[in-house]
Image (cartoon, grey):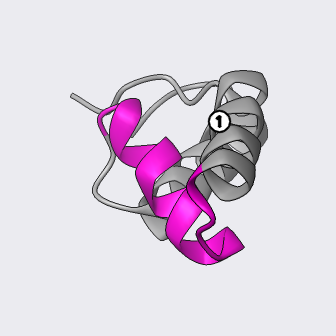
Amino acid sequence: MTPIPDIDAFEERAAIVEYDGGLCRSDAEDIAARAQGFRDAAQFFEALADYVISKKLT
C-alpha cells in the first residue's frame, strides 16, 4: 500500500538535508521521499497529486 505523503515533513527533511548535508535540492528531495517510504521524489509527488485530486491513495 502507498504511504500517505506528508508534504510538511517532506519539505522540512529536504531543506535540512540540502542545507546541512550540502546536497543539491533534487538529491535532498529523493532522500526526504525515501524517509517516508517512497522510491524517490517523483513517486512522492505522484502519490501526493493523486491524493489531493482523489482524496484517496491508489
In the image, is residue 43 above or below residue 55? below
* Residue 32, magenta (yes or no): yes
Q: Amino acid at mark 1?
A: Phe
Secondary structure beneath dot 1 equals helix
Residues in magenta?
A: 21-37
All told, the count of numbered labels is: 1
Residue under the image location 57 percent in, 60 percent down = 28
Q: Nearer the viewer, residue 56 or 48?
A: 48
The residue wearing badge 1 is: 10
Q: Nearer the viewer, residue 53 or 6?
A: 6
Looking at the rendered image, the quarter that the N terminus falls into is top left
Would you say 35 lies left or right of 21 here? left
Residue 25, by quadrant, is bottom right
Q: Nearer the viewer, residue 13 or 8?
A: 13
Where residue 57 appears, as percent x and y from the top left, is 46, 31
In the image, is residue 24 above or below residue 4? below
Where residue 36 appears, as percent x and y from the top left, is 40, 30
Residue under the image location 33 percent in, 46 percent down = 38
Q: Nearer the viewer, residue 18 or 30?
A: 18
* Residue 12, magenta (yes or no): no
In the image, is residue 15 above or below residue 52? below
**Residue density around tag 1, few if under 14, some if 14–19, many if 20 or more, within 10 Å:** many
Where residue 37 appears, as percent x and y from the top left, is 29, 34
Residue under the image location 65 percent in, 36 percent down = 10
Where residue 23 appears, as percent x and y from the top left, is 59, 69
Residue at the limit of the structure toward the left, as seen here:
1
Task: Considering the whole magenta stretch, tell me its main secondary structure.
Answer: helix
Looking at the rendered image, the quarter that the C terminus falls into is top left
In the image, is residue 20 above or below residue 41? above
Would you say 36 lies left or right of 10 here? left
